[in-house]
Amino acid sequence: MGSCAVTAPVIKLPVLDSLTVQAYRRLGRGLRFSFEVAGEVGELLLEPGRAPECGVSLSLETRCGVMTFSDAGPLLSLMGDCPVVLADTENDPCSWFWALFEQRMSTQLVSVFGYVRPICDVQPQTFECRASIALGQARSVSRLRMAPESLLALYESGHWHPLKASVADRFPFLIPVILGQLQLSVEQLRSVQPGDVVLLESTQLDVEGVGQLNVGKLRLHVMIDDEGARRCLNICSIEEVAVDDVFFASTDVDANANANANANANANANANANANAQAQRVLDEDQSLENLPLALSVRCGALKLSLGELRQLAPGVVLNIEGYSPGMAGLYYGDRPIGQGQLVEVDGRLGLQLSRIIFSR
């Protein structure tokens, strides 16, 4: 550890704007909307992720904004009792057909979308999800692209149901986003100066911002977006981790456990006596404890989520990371901040170049 003689490159991570984050959080694990067509019950489902890009893509202007559907024909056909057949190119948005389509469209879907008017050119959009419609035995899946505000407007326009019901939505959780760990002695901490770089010895996320975050029994495979005004966390995939596998892998009891209990107790008593004697010698000799290692961590902020939001976590969800501006992070002993600075990469390793020391001298 010491002052870095060369300028370490600052890590550049991608970023999403606040509206996109809000839209992904609203989408959660998915949203369901029920409707009817000619007395038959149907369901429109919006889920995180993307469907295969196939069929004819079509951009539609609606009351909630422009929406682009892949394989649009089969999906639109299930929105009412008017089959939709699209040409590969040059579908006329001014055709009389679209007025007929709106008239035969489900009244519940009309209340959500308002109107549906095709646009000549396919419009690029920033927010993506998977849209599917089931009507009777028929089902169609499409890749849906739109602006994040369009998703929020869709949600406000109809009575949507989350795929997994939220319980105790307001119960808050603060989840630290830990980039990695390192060890320093008290003596080393006292010698730290602004400009020094500490390198992580083990990491949960690499220099590209890709890695894992454990939340209870969930292991989130994530990527940090760190460009622009806000720092965000993309959830790429989720797996459940058995607590027994993590904490109790070495606690198996075999048939000889009772027979060995007394021997172990005696051995432990002798070990404790030796440890106490050694500790007393250390104190008697007035040896300094300055070289004892301290387990430290580097955090780039925290996730503030309710229990309901935790239940809605799914691949594709994007969350705000609060606490530090992009590119910055803090050095912690337990939950106590003892320094902060800028994330850097040194020879392929993630480090923190300290700009402020909070550790008391």
Image (cartoon, grey):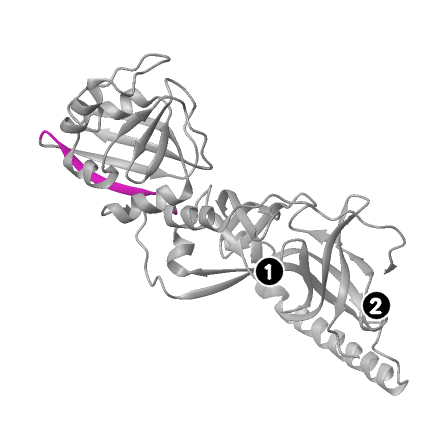
| Mark number, residue 301 | 1
Q: Nearer the viewer, residue 192 or 203?
A: 192
Please say if the residues under marks 1 and 2 sit with CB atoms less than 8 Å apart.
no
Please identify the quadrant where the N terminus is shown: bottom right
Q: What whole-number distance in Å separates the C-alpha atoms at marks 1 and 2?
A: 22 Å
Tell me what residue is drawn at x 67 percent, y 69 percent: 264
Picture layout, residue 103 above or below residue 361 = above
Tell me what residue is drawn at x 71 percent, y 77 percent: 269
Q: Nearer the viewer, residue 146 or 265?
A: 146
Callout 1 secondary element: strand
Callout 2 secondary element: loop
Q: Please name the predominant secondary structure of the magenta segment in the image.
A: strand
Residue 248 visible in this rendered orientation of the protein: no
Residue type at mark 1 is Gly
Tell me what residue is drawn at x 32 percent, y 23 percent: 72
| Relative horizontal placement of residue 332, taking residue 213 as reference (left or right) | right
Residue type at mark 2 is Gln
Picture layout, residue 172 above or below residue 269 = above
Q: Which residue is labeled 2 in the image?
A: 193
What span is colored magenta in the figure? 28-38
| Relative horizontal placement of residue 193, taking residue 114 as reference (left or right) | right
Q: Nearer the viewer, residue 156 or 312?
A: 156
Locate residue 294, reporting x and y percent: 75, 68
Q: Residues within 10 Å of mark 1 (few under 14, many from 20)?
A: many
Please identify the quadrant where the C terminus is shown: bottom right
